[in-house]
Amino acid sequence: MTFSIHGQAVARGIAIGRAVLVASSRVDVAHYFIKPEQVEAEIDRVRAGRNTVVDEIHRLQVSVSQMGPKEAPHELAALLDVHLMLLQDEELISGVKHWITDRLYNAEWAVTTQLEVIARQFDEMEDSYLRERKADLEQITEKVLRAMKGVASPMVPMATRASRTTQQDLLLDDTVDVPLILVAHDLSPADMLQFKQSVFAGFVTDVGGKTSHTAIVARSLDIPAVVGARSSSQLVRQDDWVIIDGDAGVIIADPSPIILAEYGFKQRQAELERGRLSRLRHTPAVTLDGQKVELLANIEMPDDAIGAVKAGAVGVGLFRSEFLFMGRQNDDLPDEEQQYDAYKRAIDGMQGMPVTIRTIDVGADKQLNESHRDEGHLNPALGLRAIRWSLADPAMFMTQLRAILRAAAHGRVNLLIPMLAHVSEIRQTLALLGQARAELDRRGDSYGPVQLGAMIEIPAAALTLKLFLKYFDFLSIGTNDLIQYTLAIDRDDESVAHLYDPLHPAVLRLVADTIAECQAQGKSVSVCGEMAGDVTLTRLLLGLGLRSFSMHPAQILAVKQEVLKANAGKLAPWAQEVLAAEDPAQLAHAPPAEPRLLRSDVGQWTDVSTS
Ligand code: PEP
Ligand code: MG
């Protein structure tokens, strides 16, 4: 039966494929595709795990039979019988074999998938006694999974966690040819990064907000995605056909043939539009009235620079360096040499164009790895995050600063500091930067000059711009956090996602004032939050005077098209009206009458209003 679930639109486009469900399990399990030649070994691992549990139960049965009724009530013996029976259940065994043999799931993934399939059947049973056997089934599969932990797979990836399903190793395997849609309760930003090597055509999660870091990474992958689609991981079944409408933020499960055909058509249209946009790659981003606009890329990993250049970016406006630190095993952080190599790779990849490296911004929804997960603090977004985290660990911070300074010898580098609010933080940062340079001098290592920038993402910073402009060469407005902290909306929480409003007058006021103050003082300013890549806001930001936008490479061409069609001079008075409005959203979506435009066959626009 066809049904749809609404969530938050994250990454545009339509994806159609079969659902791959990543069920939450109480035991840490890994998920990855195996090679066909590993099938037998994986089945053996499950068999070995199951035999261990069967032996354990047999031993227990013997000791129970030797106890008196007081120590071992007869229900215990009955329960052990049930467990043995479940372990020998044909549906469980054949199902697990099916996922391994036909789908090439690794053993643990196959076990949890089949558990999910059978658990749903239990849920639907009328008989409450039988319904309750689900708990027994969960218990014995948990035991099997634990037993299997001792029987290592040849390709054991990083562990995954129970309540938040991490997705570390869904690796590319060319034996899978039907498009696959990943459906999970939750995915961490580091897990999302693994998608860069994965087979998935789209993904859906139950939780998450539009500007959560998981969503941000998904957007950078440029595959259709919906987050905050509550209970989709409960309602969608393994292998269901699923459509993701990434523009509307809707998923449709088990679509009828008519719906499938309609979305197939939409998918082809979107591909054609993509093709049309690609012609703008080499077109300079200049408005109709001759204003040059800088379109920069946000990247997470050094190799993303290649995609940024391909998309026509004129530099990197935000390298989220924390992704180098995330998802690593054994708690080790990248050392100076590893970081230097990574930054240098990004700089080389940008072929002489500037690279803005933001110092580590972990905390809140970006945890280094599972062992660092912040479960203890109620409000991690207000806690030890970003520069606060760096200043709390000066040795780690200095290592990063030295690596960036050394990499700066190889190209144009801007150093960007996240989440500053206090003058004391600014002074400490500058002092540590000075110490990092002194250390490099002492070591005789060469390093390059950097432009120093601050992110404006806390209202306190936006309200004390003069202070920031005194110490920094440029500012970058992190609207994702600026909105979160101005409106007191957790950007991760889908239940308040409707209140997360880039067009709230207070947000617009802070953004407008930051742009205006930088202009007045001749300092450069960009927006690197998700607002910069939102085509519905391009004209407003141009009207407010913004000339530097940093976004995912996948968004650059669509924003460029908006820039090419805009007349910045005419947009300025309208932008001031939007700023003064009680409900800016009403006006913001009705910009002044468009000039009459003619598009050339290379995609450029000419104003023909007066001709
Ligand atoms: C922002 O807050 O807008 C920003 C760009 O930083 P991040 O999304 O990584 O917090
Ligand atoms: Mg931020």
Image (cartoon, grey):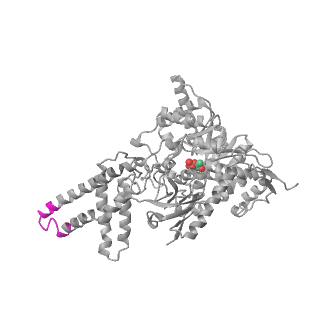
Residue depicted at 26% across the width and 63% down the height: 88
Q: Give the residue furthest to the right.
A: 611
Q: Is residue 237 magenta?
A: no
Residue 558 makes an appearance in the image: no
Q: Nearer the viewer, residue 479 or 599?
A: 599
On the image, the x and y values in percent for residue 135 come to 31, 66
Residue 49 in picture, x, y percent from top left: 27, 54
Question: From the viewer's perspective, is residue 457 above or below residue 69?
Answer: above
* Magenta-drawn segment: 61-76
Measured as percent of width and height from the top left, residue 154 is found at 35, 45
Between 364 and 219, the one lying in front of the other is 219
Residue at 14 percent of width and 61 percent of height: 62
Count the labels in the image: 0
Q: Provide residue 560's location: percent of width, then percent of height.
A: 70, 49
Instruction: Check residue 66 for magenta coloring.
Output: yes
Q: Is residue 214 left or right of residue 106?
A: right
User: In terms of depth relative to the viewer, which is nearer, 235 or 176?
Assistant: 176
* Residue 58, quarter of the rendered image: bottom left
Examine the rendered structure and indicate whether residue 65 appears above or below residue 384: below
| Left or right: residue 527 compared with residue 434 | right
Above or below — where is 148 with respect to 453? below
Report which quarter residue 346 is drawn in.
Answer: top right
User: In the orientation shown, which residue stands out farthest toward the bottom?
Assistant: 126
Horizontal arrangement in the rendering, residue 60 relative to residue 550 (left or right): left
At x 79%, y 58%, the residue is 594
For the C terminus, the image quarter is: bottom right
Q: Could you tell me if residue 115 is visible in this image? A: yes
